[in-house]
Amino acid sequence: MFVQEVYNWGRYPRQYAEVVPVRDLETLSEKLSSSQPWLARGMGRSYGDTALSSQILDMLPLKHFLRFDEQTGELEALAGATLDDVLKVFVPKGWFLPVTPGTKYVSLGGALAADVHGKNHHSEGSFSKHVRSFSLLTEKGELLEVSPENVDMFQSTAGGMGLTGIIVKLVLRLKPIETSYIRQESFKARNLDEIFALFEATQYATYSVAWINCLSQGQALGRSILMTGEHAFSDQVRGLKKTLLASHSNPKLVMPVDLPEVALNPFSIKAFNLLYYHKQIADKSTSIVHYDPFFYPLDSILHWNRMYGKRGFTQYQFVIPQEAGLPTMRSILQKIAQSGQGSFLAVLKAFGEQNDLISFPMKGYTLALDFAISDQLFPLLDRLDEMVLDAGGRLYLAKDVRMSADLFHKSYTRSAEWIEILKGLNPNCTFRSVQSDRLKITPW
Amino acid sequence: MKQKTLLILGARSEVAQSIAELFGRNGFDVLLAARNADKLSSLVADLQIRTGGNFQSVEFDLLHTQGHLDFYNALPARPDVVVCVVGLLGNQQEAEQDYGHARLIIESNFSGVVSILHVVAADFEKRRAGHILAIGSVAGDRGRQSNYVYGAAKAGLATFLSGLRNRLHNSKVKVSTIKPGFIRTRMTEGMKLPPFITAEPIEVAKAVYMAYVDQKNVVYVLWPWRYIMLIIKSIPEFIFKKLKL
């Protein structure tokens, strides 16, 4: 146990916390009986304050794989195992993650607690849809086996940000693959109408995501590139690549220092975005790419979060329902473009049906944008909040660092129901975070 | 060809687990020896899933020296390679005030190892084959006020291994001393370690495996340590004794 400065991927905010590495269940039970507040934490790849607390249980040492069924692809693993681990071990055996976010440096427990989504949300749902069961250690020290049939407990934990208890292990169903390659198609979209039409036209693709230039205005508003992908079959790869089932290697590039904040003025962002857009000359192109650059383009640069300067950054990610779609997205993008605070990286994605208790996704469109922390930023985000709320949308808790408690309770329409379940599982408020206090979820 | 067997003494450490995984990937059957071996079941499952190799845990208490011969004779297979990863950093201040703690450090790093490695050595000598690798420490290269009880035990270990290497040379048995420097593990958790001279457990495992393959005598895991310790060793004692190290 020791006190250290803790922060998550956005490097904002930071705070000193007592961090206890969890190596066995005994450590957990002992800490829980101390009648102090605790929060389980994994890789710290959430962006804001959701994995911050003054007392943290570091779950990463609990990382063993316990059982793997070669017939069904069911993997039982301790919660501290990472997606990176899973890929390295199981890709060569012909299995892939059923759902993966844009980084592989995430623990399984964290992936369930945030109920992460990936480029296949529209076709295969969020992470929790592929979890067969998990073990939850509650405030009373009980170890509960929870499956999707235990609706309340399952749904309040998936996306529940660690507030129901500690996810100790879980059973995940992996996806069979013939190769570790993706058949990728890229499409150019000149504006927002075109990109929405492209999402519609490619709705049967397994994976799809768009990179959008947030600084282009007027006719070019919403200028973007849509990428779709399918797992490549062996006959599509044979002869092109040496090994059909090659896992990834460790990153070779490191962002060594904090970039100065001037590196992020609108001009440099424009240059970056243009470069990205013109990488591709034809309107449509097809290629066979490894899963690593397809799913994790930014993982290849270790500590890329340093490029936003010393003050850190936040990622603003919202979802709006499909009905609100195009007009709301247009006004939000206009607002961002006018502000000139636009992000290096903006990702647009269509979500499929999902209507869980506290999970973020819903049928509609999600946009994620990075912003360097600055004095002008929060007023802009407050304006965006209003537009998102009016459209019936909400913000992703795993990225959030500043929304108001009021916005949370209004936009997560089943929050009251969720909090009632939390009170039953976590009556003394043992599990709480800086975020849960800020959003007035805790204490009760 | 007969499957080779590796015995790891002190299998609970992260370094030991990395060594087990690396040797397992390279075709060894691995016996994981530690106290409370039943608690290693998740580790055994994990290593099996990761590597597809054979792993088995066996109960072993370094400090119970009377039991070492029985432990060795009861192993499910004769080992071809033995890696000794046992060790206890302990607390220097406590060791100064409480001989019980000092003795525990000495037994955990030195006398317990003498006992078990002599059992192993006798068997290897008879079979005229085998390789013993033990994790020493740069702390044993010179006594410093911050950890000299631990350092003295590791110095004893280094001298013991050097003598053992000399004794077993004609029996074709190899003995390697591995000196890691700082390692990022639970032993050093919370300490501020300089990154360029701090090894990850996997780097130590690779050094152990290469020492086995290349039949090395003494190996520094990270090369700067050889020179750092060369300098530290060459400081005259009348100056050294005044330093805060």
Image (cartoon, coloured by chain):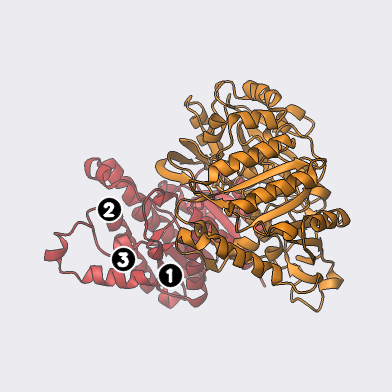
Q: Assess whether mark 3 and mark 2 are in contact (beta carbons under 8 angstroms).
A: no
From this view, report whether residue A164 is shown above or below residue A129.
above
**Which class describes the residues within 10 Å of circle 1: few (<14), some (14-19), or many (20+)?**
many
Measured Cα–Cα span from mark 1 to mark 3? 12 Å
Which residue does the image show at 80% across and 42% down from the upper left? A363
Marks 2 & 3 on one chain? yes
> Is B7 in front, or is B192?
B192
**Comes first in the chain, label 2 or label 3:** 2
From this view, report whether residue A206 is shown above or below residue A245.
above
Q: Amino acid at mark 2?
A: Asn
Q: State the hue of chain A.
A: orange
Image quadrant assignment for residue B199: bottom left
Mark carried by residue B159: 3
Mark carried by residue B147: 2
Mark carried by residue A379: none
Residue, disc 1: B175
Marks 2 & 1 on one chain? yes
Residue B28 position in % (x across, y down): 61, 65
